[in-house]
Image (cartoon, rainbow, N blue to C red):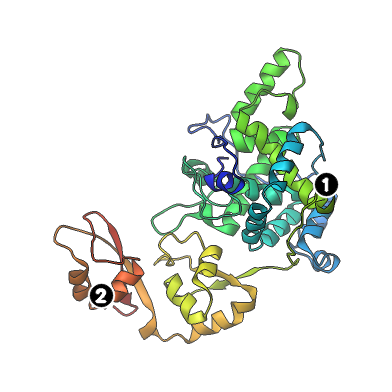
Amino acid sequence: MQRAWIVLLLLGIPLAGCGHLAPAPSAELAPQIATASPRNPAAASATAASADSAGAVADFADLFARMRSGFALPALENAAVRREIERYRAHPLALERIFGRGRRYLHHIVAELDARGLPQELALLPAVESAFDPFALSRRLASGLWQFLPRTGRSHGLAQDWWTDDRRDVREATRAALDHLSSLYESFDGDWLLALAAYNAGPGRVRRAIARSERRGERADFFALDLPAETRRYVPRLLALARLVAEPEAVGIELPEIPNEPYFAPVDVAYQIDLDRIADLAEIPRKELRALNPEYRRWATAPDGPRELLVPVADKERFEQLLAELPPSQRLRLVRHRVESGDTLYALARRHGIPLEMLRSVNRIRGSRIRIGQDLLIPLPTDA
């Protein structure tokens, strides 16, 4: 998938943006939404009943330790992997920022991998794709932690409309990415390195590289294939990250402490709400609530649902109580308005009987300028 530029900026590495599935893949090459057979079916059946069994929590206090117990990719030591290790070692603050963001999402991803019996190294793939930034957007419009292009996202059930973009939804995008990776793993006969290369460059391009190698009578493993330069760095970069997590002392880095416990919990919301407003009322930092609910493009839940928010586990009970006790007069219904000729913020506020400052605040407008064709949110009382 296409890497967001934030990774390159953070690491200071002048690379070209990585490839992605072809814009219009043929039916033969388009991956199906499926959960691949795990590398260890017996282990998978033992964990499938729960994405986060009590045993997994009890055995490991630290999330990185839990991840190490599930590492299964080949621990390769070659020049390409060593080069990527040195890049990370040279930028410890960038690595710290990556895992600082990742601590919100890693436990969920690790638990999902456990439930499917998949290699835990895959939990580090969003670090390569987006630096664990759910708002990361590439030049080719790949979005979210797992960097889905619009077309690829839709093919994996990730809805995208004016209100929401499920490519940025932490849980939905993770589900889709693991489905996609599992399908690629099966497609490439159980070779995870080739599956990862296909996730980056597209399965068709990897198959053509394999065919060229076979015609020449050469090896057809990942490191022998003639693949795009970015893909040749992409897989070693993930292997390098896995090495850093597997042996941080040996490599000479210090990993942050991330507890092996859920970071967020879902809360059902019975009515449409503005995220910033409810964050202020719940005394949860706006940045935190946005980071856990990045799929809401207008910073408000959609009028017709579904309405569910993720909140820090410690805030769940208080948040639910606040939602239950918030009187209807303080709730808002947000409707979409497309600016027409003659519209002004003042006129719109007066027409709908709302304070001008509220209209500005909901739409993140500092001044008074609006343009024809611009979409605005109009906050209305729930009984309007």
Q: Residue at x 31, y 75 (%)?
A: 358
Q: Amino acid at mark 1?
A: Asn
Amino acid type, callout 2: Leu
Indicate the position of residue 198 as horizontal and vertical percent values.
64, 34
- What residue is pinned by disc 2? 356
Is the residue 192 above or below the residue 371 in the image? above
Instruction: Label 2, secondary structure: give it.
Output: helix
The picture places residue 181, in percent across and down from the top left corner, at 66, 43
Q: In the picture provided, is 128 more to the left or to the right than 70? A: left
| Residue 40's disc number | 1
Q: Nearer the viewer, residue 210 or 145?
A: 145
Give the quadrant of the C terminus.
bottom left
Of residues 333 and 294, the one nearer the viewer is 294
Position of 315 relative to 172 (above/below): below
Quarter holding the N terminus is top right
Between marks 2 and 1 in the image, the one whose residue lies nearer the viewer: 2
Sequence-wise, which precedes: disc 2 or disc 1? Answer: 1
Looking at the rendered structure, the number of numbered marks drawn on it comes to: 2
Label 1: state its secondary structure: loop
Left or right relative to 300: residue 368: left
